Amino acid sequence: MTAFSLQGKRVWVAGHRGMVGGAIVRRLAAENCEVLKATHSELDLTRQADVEGWMAAKKPQAVFIAAAVVGGILANDTRPVDFLTDNLAIQNNIIATAHKIGVEKLMFLGSSCIYPRLAPQPMPESALLTGPLEPTNQWYAIAKIPGIMQCQAYRRQYGRDFISAMPTNLYGPGDNFDLLSSHVLPALIVKAHRAKQAGDAAMTLWGSGQPRREFLYVDDLADACVFLMKTYSDESHVNVGYGSDVTIREVAEIVAEVVGFKGKLAYDSSKPDGMPKKLLDSAKLNAMGWKPATGLKEGIAKAYDWYCRNAASAPTGN
Ligand code: GFB
């Protein structure tokens, strides 16, 4: 493995206002580097000429691509154009320009939904492109797969040090708590909090509660990203997971306990379940010496605390 030092470098975190980008910025504070950021009003990442102009002027030496159109199971299903074409444009513009201006190291971030719906569990890196995708997130998955291939292609043809990491389902500070577009964990936090405040007898989950998901605290992901940026240099993408999964019902029970909601769980079967199980095989990353630091209940307590201090009073979708 080749060591790459971030010290003294200009490091661009594309998507720094998102949950993942924000966590990477927090983690980079310990790396003695200059963090570059561009807000959406300063730079529209879907516009190639703008990305080229901005990157040529700012000259980042390292880039984390944490910018993406993201969302939970319903948002994926109802906004296919945004999830497919915006994500393709964003990653293509950044990766191609990174090559043009000679970025020394780049990390592309994908998602565990790149793997087939019925992939072997836990899902190893080698399961990519071995079967049909889960229909509820196929647009996002189809957009992310070429990002991995692009990093590989620039490495093969031009010797670029571009790598990719595939995180599992994430949660934590800076999450999206809008019930119509969020992922399950922030949605459960909002639902439990509101149900507790209203004195409701039950809170309603989407689907059957039976699907299994793996949840990683976002600051642990950021730590893994910086670790890989500094130590990993190869073609294959690397899974970044927590190491174990729970059913949606089980995670709802943990959220209810953390929030202090004592009512029942109800299920809305008109909403989709999505993948029956999504657990990454993170053996490759673990063998390099990295492990997550935050337990699930501990992470949920931190996320709930952040929600109470920052988002609980904001209007959210219903
Ligand atoms: O996190 P989530 O929206 O997406 O949903 P995926 C996970 C599971 O939680 C599904 C259930 O079985 C949902 O039906 N669920 C229960 C809920 N209650 C709720 C709720 O109130 N809100 C939400 N959102 N779900 C995502 C992809 O898939 O995984 C993304 O859509 C991304 O593109 C991400 O790849 C990692 O885990 O099914």
Image (cartoon, rainbow, N blue to C red):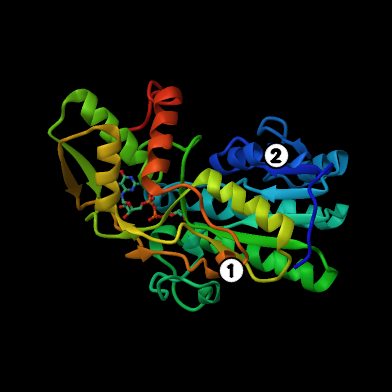
- Alpha carbon distance from label 1 to label 2: 24 Å
Image location of residue 273, percent across then percent down: 29, 58
* Residue 57: quarter of image: top right
* Viewer-side residue, 272 vs 289: 289
Image location of residue 106, percent across then percent down: 74, 55
Q: Quadrant of the C terminus?
A: top left
The residue identified by callout 2 is 30
Specify the farthest residue to the left: 201
Left or right: residue 275 versus residue 219 is left
Which badge, 1 or 2, comes first in the chain's sequence?
Answer: 2
Q: Is residue 271 visible?
A: no
Q: Label 1 is placed on what type of residue? A: Ala
Q: Judge whether 242 appears above or below 117 on screen.
A: above
* Residue 232: quarter of image: bottom right
**Is the C-beta of the residue carrying label 1 under 8 Å from the nearest atom of ligand 1?**
no
Q: How many marks?
A: 2
* Residue 2: quarter of image: bottom right
Q: Quadrant of the N terminus?
A: bottom right
Label disc, if present, on residue 287 of the rendered structure: 1
* Viewer-side residue, 8 vs 193: 8
